[in-house]
Amino acid sequence: MSTKNKVNEIKLYHGTQRVFTTFDNKEALDGAHYFTVSREHAEYFGSVSEHTLSLKNTMTIDMMALYDRVTDDDVDNDILPRDYISTFIEEAKLKGYDSLHITNFEDIQLSADIYLPFNTANIHPYAEPSLSTKETVEKSLYDALSESDDTLLSLLLEFKRGENRLIARDIFAQDLAHFTVDSENEKLATISKREIVRLEKRSLPGQLKKIVDLTGVQISNPNGTQGGFFLPDASEVGKYRLTLFNKDGFTGHVTRDTYSELITSSTEYGFSKIEPGILEKMSSFESFSKGNVVASMIGRLNEGTIDYKKFLQLVKRIDDDHGADDHFYPQP
């Protein structure tokens, strides 16, 4: 899979116990240095440095592609999925890619996307970007608040007459209004109360509370990568469930006594909007059915009903059958 990406806009982390000033692929374990989106992941390997990568043509694979390369003989010889990274690097180079991107890379009990650039000239120290319009407006509002309520009101009225009025209004409603709702400046207090009410009506909880029956209502996070839907709980009569999923299958559920409590929980899990059809969209990915099968296998592995060798053997069989048959679920 080719990706013309914007990795140069992302802060990435590199962890190492070695001390050096320049990257050299000859010193890299797999012929390319690892950069992860997770600082926690990088910290495990030593001191952390921050970088950006200027990549034009990345080959993207999922962790499952590494599992698929592992043979029964590999399992017997303790060869792990990550041992095939160097193979994918060579394949990517032969196809003209300048880097390898592995999504959901599993390592040291953590899962995070990693990037491996083939040319060290594409590795750059991370520099904080200049402030955007939103960040500039946000900073000015906070500075005004720290000075006085009167100063903040004057600035809000100034923004109201300018081109950034909508940006300023949203930032004030989301971040500042709760601090000024009891302001001695009566006009600022009135504006604060009005903006809080407006924000609550626009929020996901505000929209969900207008729906009489939430059964089957689908919701998502801001970028549409995580989904959920509401249902009465089948295993606990009288309770209600928010089932969670992404493109890699069902990831869990949240159970509460009432739909009202679930609405509160939905925002805690990062959901922000009602999105009909997101389950159908996610389930169209091949990884959705595969992910459900692997999740079941991981459950068996954690329960101790299968060992790691058996787990890898079962994962290898996913491409032949996506899990519809019982033979993917070994009996205790």
Image (tube, grey):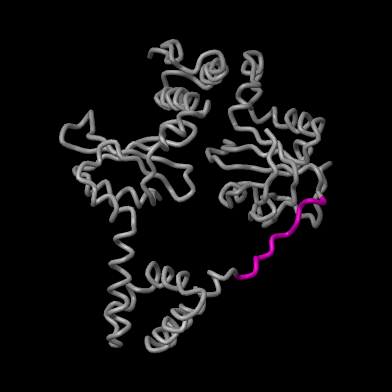
Q: Residue at x 53, y 38 (%)?
A: 109
Q: Nearer the viewer, residue 28 or 222?
A: 222
Q: Quadrant of the N terminus?
A: top right
Horizontal relation, residue 104 to residue 159: left or right: right
Locate residue 254, reporting x and y percent: 30, 40
In the rendered image, which quarter is residue 296 located in?
top left
**Residue 274 belongs to the span the image colors magenta:** no
**Residue 122 belongs to the span the image colors magenta:** yes
In the rendered image, which quarter is residue 242 located in?
top left
Q: Nearer the viewer, residue 51 or 306?
A: 51
Q: Quadrant of the C terminus?
A: top left
In the rendered image, which quarter is residue 108 located in?
top right
Relative to 237, say whether 8 is above or below.
below
Q: Residue at x 57, y 71 (%)?
A: 133
Magenta segment: 121-131
Horizontal relation, residue 78 to residue 157: left or right: right
